[in-house]
Image (spheres, rainbow, N blue to C red):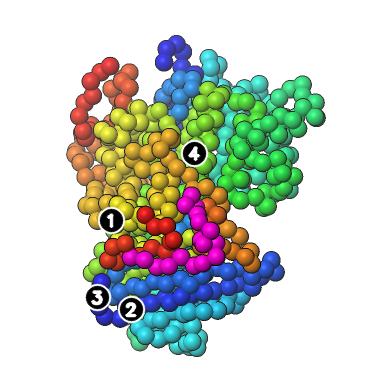
Amino acid sequence: MTAAAPLLRVRDLTLEFVTRGGTVRALDAVGLAVAEGETVGVVGESGSGKSVMALAVMGLLDRAGRITAGGVEYRGRRIEALPERELRRLRGPEIAMVFQNPRTALNPIRPVGRQLVDVIRAHRALGRRAAEAEAVAMLRAVRITDPEARMGAYPFELSGGMCQRVMIALALACAPRLVIADEPTTGLDVTTQAVIMDLVAGLAAERAMAALFITHDLALAAEHCHRIVVMHAGQVVETATPGRLFAAPAHPYTRQLARSTPGEATTVATLETVPGNLPDLTDPCLPACRYAARCPLVAPRCLTERPPRTEPWPGHAVFCWNPA
Amino acid sequence: MTGEPFVEVHRLSRTFALPALRPPGGGRPVPRHLQAVDDVSFSLARGQALGLVGESGCGKTTLAHILARLADPTAGGLVFDGRDLAAVPAARFARDPARRRIQMVFQDATEALNPRDTVLEAIAGPIRLLVPGLRGREVAERAAATAARVNLPPELMTRFPHQLSGGQRARVGIARAIGVEPELLILDEPTSALDVSIQAVVLKLLDRLRRESALTYVFVSHDLNVVRMLCDRVMVMYLGRLIEEGPVEAVFRNPRHPYTAALIDAIPRLGARGAARERLAGEPRSPVNPSPTVCRLVGRCAHEQARCRAAMPPLGPEGAGHRHACFFPLGRDEEPC
């Protein structure tokens, strides 16, 4: 990490969705920073708010979503204050997104080559020929064999792994400085997942591109990220390098999560479960630490006072009243 | 394990006919078939848990459906507790006395449950159909007892699937299968739709149920660590072929087939950032009209030689506990025991 201002800074982002069932307090004072060229992993269970945070960074929030405090800064500009026209200029050349399910994110009735050409021409002043050549080069960069022939293929003609490569090619087509990948390998086989992650990590290093990598797979994040942010129920609970996080997790949730992930040496006896469920985020009296109801170390003030940020180690931050 | 195997699968194959395709240069249309399961043989002792792993499209779900007798094989035998079931068509098997003894837990409980059935109805349905001589009240009692076995609280019995959490739905799916007290349970990715914290609860539950009722499991999964934890034996499939089979620890510690090694290598590990690994090149070959004289891994394998393109390696050694289908296996031979 450099001393310079980070590329992306999410500062105390607090966000609600107003629904018929009540106000969902989806994010609570979420903070994180991504430096130029850095790969940051955001890990948490479903419902932890990691995807909502990514959409807020992209300025793609649903109308029902309302930022009540904090905000997102990209290279010093407040994203939530930008008009849609400015946002469109940002998306693609500056920040690009790899969406979760390539089969639904790609247009099913348009050949993948055309979709690539569309993106390239929307953001760069290139003629059709030049854009097509660029699209072929992108498909080659994501290691699609025989890219010229694949330009005319429809998504249904490609395997899941190939569709995901096309998604990545779309995101990288305008050489963004920051790519946000939301569960880019969920639904893929482990072998394909390994190849895709190598590819993204390789391209990120090659182009000095920063990445925000969202996943529920702790081990996958550990393997590919410089830094990991652990989220629970819309709050950041811990952030550290993977080595530090798994050698000395300071937050009880991180510890439970690591112990409930089956590893090589895990037996049924040593496998631990995270007790309880995610709290109901429409509850108007959520505890200050939203992990309190599930936490083995819960103390009275966890319910009433926001846990402070402490640094047990340089670069390792935890939000807990009883950190290990 | 002594005596007759509980489940014996002998040279089982399943092909799906595809429309014939006219070659690009013209001429007669070429008949095509998709070889989903190709010449698979194995046996399973009572009370064992067998893991079935491989990439999507390798035929593991088709094999699971055949074992559960929801699909018919095109060739080969399936002997269950001394009786050949391959001869009974799947449609007729629904009314076979053995239907109660072989049950299946489906992949995504959200899709597998009828949205208009309450939890009680979902669990009672199979009991009413398959356990003869029970009266309405006894069926309901048994359903409630089954729900308790999978830790579903009684107040959920009147709920509909959309009112349940993912973990609760998975439990209803399991309860449906075990309510009729089966002996062989086929589980197709029972936890792949769940978060790790919920997955851990369901895995512990499955392990407890197996021990309580001496169930035999066939556990289909893409998560090798889960298979390693829950199963006694593991089978690795690739494009319809069984390419390695053996006790879990032997296969994980000493994989012989390069594909198995790559599969194990691809598992992400906590605290192992940037470790250089072996990767498989490219994509699997097409399962349509596969050549019977070429190893299926040709083109992706770093160790292939001319012999791999001239003959299909057989699964061997015959009768060994740990078998593999490779001419040039990795690792070391094991002591026969």
What's the chain of the residue with tag 1? A
Alpha-carbon neighbours of circle 3 within 10 Å: few (<14), some, or many (≥20)?
few
Q: Return the residue at label 4.
A: B203
Query: Magenta segment: does it hold B155?
Result: no
Q: Is residue A205 left or right of residue B37?
A: left
Q: Determine whether A226 is above or below B38 in the image.
A: below
Question: How many residues crowd around disc 2 within 10 Å: few (fewer than 14), some, or many (20 or more)?
Answer: some
Horizontal and vertical percent for residue A303?
55, 62
Label 4 to label 1: alpha-carbon separation: 27 Å
The Cα atoms of the two marked residues, 3 and 2, are separated by: 11 Å
Chain of the residue where label 4 is placed in the rendered structure: B
**Which residues make up the magenta segment?**
A295-311
| Residue at screen point 38% across, 77% down | A9
Does residue B309 appear in this view? yes
Tell me the amino acid under the disc marked 1: Gly
Mark yes or no: residue B282 visible. no
- Are both tags, 4 and 2, on one chain? no
- Does the magenta portion include A301? yes
Identify residue for label 2: A7
Earlier in the chain: of badge 1 and badge 3, it is 3
- The furthest residue to the front: A300
Q: Position of residue A221 (x, y in %)?
A: 35, 57
Which residue carries the number 1 mark? A243
